Structure formats: structure tokens, C-alpha cells
Image (cartoon, grey):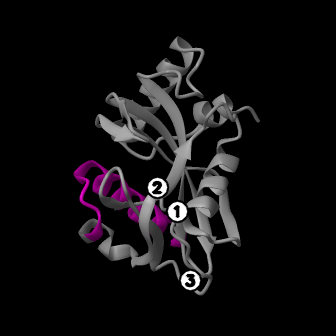
Amino acid sequence: MRWIDTIEKYVPWNEQEKKDKEVILQCISTFNDILTRENQIAHMTSSAFIINKHKDKVLMVYHNIYQSWSWVGGHADGEEDLLYVAMKEAKEETGVKNISILEENILSLDVLPVEGHIKKGKYVAPHLHLSVTYLMEADEEEKLIIKPDENSDVQWIPLEEVGVYSTEPYMIKIYNKIRLKLKKFDE
């Protein structure tokens, strides 16, 4: 299935996802470079929400740019297989080698505002990340490795405490939405 089809077929979970899906599809139809950072207004990113076997902790990194605990993920950089991007980023950013995909369908669809910042000595203007997120699982006992150019810590955080660790109010809403979705999966 084409990457665009997975987004088109995604069934929004709430009003936020419904609106964000509309914006993402509009950007896809408007820009021909949406999979690359060449589009400085908005571009596709892919994230992994990695939980442990007991589904009570999430693997997070302390992100150097955002100065906050966050899920792992990154830019599509031209890659159409967004699940592959999420998996690649998960391994690179945490050092964990054995990560399982719990669901090949999109877990969360979000438009994420990114403030202007310095990256690799250059200013990056404010823009939007058109984010797809996938649910994955890893073993808590596996060795964690920091990726110094992106994060300064990697930890398993109790799922119920994510809002205490994250300092990004918008992201806390997204993480809480995902926590609620995970509870629905257990029902």
C-alpha cells in the first residue's frame, strides 16, 4: 500500500486527528516535496511509540533541541516507507536492536508545530511536522545508548508519568491521547 493510501485510509480517533488528517492531506496534494526537508513549511515525519512488554512504560529520549523527554522519530527524508523510518529512528536514537512492530497501521496522526531553532550550526525556521506514529515494543532489559547529536538521555518512563517528564504542552496532549488509545486496545 502506498504511503499516501495509509494516511487516506486512517480513521481519525478524535476531532484533533480529523482536522490534522485534513491538513496533512492538503499538504500532500499541494506540495510535491512533502517527503523532504526541502519543503521548509511542512514535511513528513515518522515516530515510534515504544512500550514495554507489560505496557506500563514507554521508551523516551531527552531531545537536545526541544529540551524535553519525547518519543523517537525523524524525518522521512524522501523515504516513502514511513514504518521503516520509525523503526530506523527508534533503533538509532535508543540503541535498542530488538524492536517489534505491534501494529503496522498508524497509531496516531498529528500536525506538530516546530519552533525555530539551531541545528548543526544553522537556523531552522518554524515549520510543521506532519507526523505518523507507529506502536512498537522493546525489552526493558536491552542496553540503551544515547545518540549525542540528537539526545542526551534514553529511559523507560512509566506511561502514567509521561506528562511529568515532557515539558511540551502540545506533546503532552498527544501522549495522553496515545495512552487512552492503548487502554482501548486492551479492552
Residue 127 place in picture, x, y as percent? 36, 29
Could you tell me if the residues under marks 1 and 2 are in contact, i.e. CB atoms within 8 Å? yes
Q: Can you identify the residue that label 1 sits on?
A: 147
Neighbor class of circle 1 (other Cα within 10 Å; few <14, some 14-19, many 20+) is some
Between discs 2 and 3, the one toward the N terminus: 3
Neighbor class of circle 2 (other Cα within 10 Å; few <14, some 14-19, many 20+) is some
Q: CA distance from mark 1 to mark 3?
A: 18 Å
Q: Quadrant of residue 54?
A: bottom right
In the drawing, does residue 152 fall left or right of residue 49? left
Q: Please name whichever residue, 179 or 83, is drawn nearer the observer in this view of the structure.
A: 83
Please identify the residue farthest to the right as the structure is shown.
1
User: What residue do we see at 62% from left, 74% from top?
Assistant: 138
Q: Quadrant of residue 32?
A: top right
In the drawing, does residue 8 fall left or right of residue 2? left
The amino acid beneath tag 1 is Lys
Q: Nearer the viewer, mark 1 or mark 3?
A: 1
Question: Predominant secondary structure in magenta?
Answer: helix
Q: CA distance from mark 2 to mark 3?
A: 21 Å
User: What residue do we see at 29% from left, 34% from top?
Assistant: 116
In the rendered structure, find residue 140 and report the number of the disc placed on it: 3
The amino acid beneath tag 2 is Glu
Q: Quadrant of the N terminus?
A: top right
Q: CA distance from mark 1 to mark 2?
A: 6 Å
Q: Can you identify the residue that label 2 sits on?
A: 150
Between discs 1 and 3, the one toward the N terminus: 3
